[in-house]
C-alpha cells in the first residue's frame, strides 16, 4: 500500500489489519519515484504481494500545495519535487477532491508502466487506486 504521510490516514485501521498484515509505503502526496517503485518491487518479488493499492485521501495538504502553487514562483526546498509531480497529475483541475483522485490515478499508471510492463512483475499483481475519506474512515476504490 502506497499512501500519504498524513497521520490522519492509518491504513491498518482503515482495513482492519494487524501488525505485519500490510506492507505500507508512506510519502507525502502518495507520489511515486524510484524509491517507492523499488519498495513495491521488493514487496511483489520477495513477499508475494499480489495487490498494490495507492491510497489517496481528501483534504490532502500536498495536493492543496500543488493547487495553490504560484506559477510565477518555484516552491522552496525539496517540497518542489512533490508539488511538481502532483501538478503533472492534476493539470488545470481546481477541485481538491478531483485533483486528489487524479493524483492517485497517475500513481497507479506510473506503477503499472514501470513495474508491471517494464520490470516484469508477475501479471497476477493488480494495481488499484482508492480514496480515504477522513470524516468517515470510508475507503472508496476507484
Image (spheres, rainbow, N blue to C red):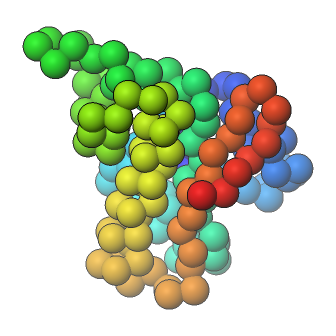
Screen quadrant of the C terminus: bottom right
Question: Left or right: 96 with respect to 6?
Answer: left
- Examine the rendered structure and indicate whether residue 118 appears above or below residue 35: below
- Examine the rendered structure and indicate whether residue 111 appears above or below residue 27: below
Which quarter of the figure has residue 114? Answer: bottom left
26 or 60: nearer the viewer: 60
Residue 111 place in picture, x, y as percent: 41, 63
Q: Residue at x 11, y 13 (%)?
A: 72
- Res 5 seen here: no
Which quarter of the figure has residue 117? Answer: bottom left
Seen as rendered, the residue at the extreme left is 72
Q: Residue at x 14, y 12 (%)?
A: 73
Residue 71 place in picture, x, y as percent: 16, 19
Q: Residue at x 79, y 58 (%)?
A: 21
Residue 137 place in picture, x, y as percent: 80, 36
Question: Left or right: 98 with respect to 124?
Answer: left
- Examine the rendered structure and indicate whether residue 81 appears above or below residue 72: below
Residue 24 place in picture, x, y as percent: 63, 49
106 or 76: nearer the viewer: 106
Number of numbered markers: 0
60 or 78: nearer the viewer: 60
Q: Residue at x 63, y 76 (%)?
A: 50
Question: Left or right: 71 with respect to 86?
Answer: left
- Examine the rendered structure and indicate whether residue 20 appears above or below residue 96: below
- Res 114 seen here: yes
Screen quadrant of the N terminus: bottom right
Amino acid at each position: 500500500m502506497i499512501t500519504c504521510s498524513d497521520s490522519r490516514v492509518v491504513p491498518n485501521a482503515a482495513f482492519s489489519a494487524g501488525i505485519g498484515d500490510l506492507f505500507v509505503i508512506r510519502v507525502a502526496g502518495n507520489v511515486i519515484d524510484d524509491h517507492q517503485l523499488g519498495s513495491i518491487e521488493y514487496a511483489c518479488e520477495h513477499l508475494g504481494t499480489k495487490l498494490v493499492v495507492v491510497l489517496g485521501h481528501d483534504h490532502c495538504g500536498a495536493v492543496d500545495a500543488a493547487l495553490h502553487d504560484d506559477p510565477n514562483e518555484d516552491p522552496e526546498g525539496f517540497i518542489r519535487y512533490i508539488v511538481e509531480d502532483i501538478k503533472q497529475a492534476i493539470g488545470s483541475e481546481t477541485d481538491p477532491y478531483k485533483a486528489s483522485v487524479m493524483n492517485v490515478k497517475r500513481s497507479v499508471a506510473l506503477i503499472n508502466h514501470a513495474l508491471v510492463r517494464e520490470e516484469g512483475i508477475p501479471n497476477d499483481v493488480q494495481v488499484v487506486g482508492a480514496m480515504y475519506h477522513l470524516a468517515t474512515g470510508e475507503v472508496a476504490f476507484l
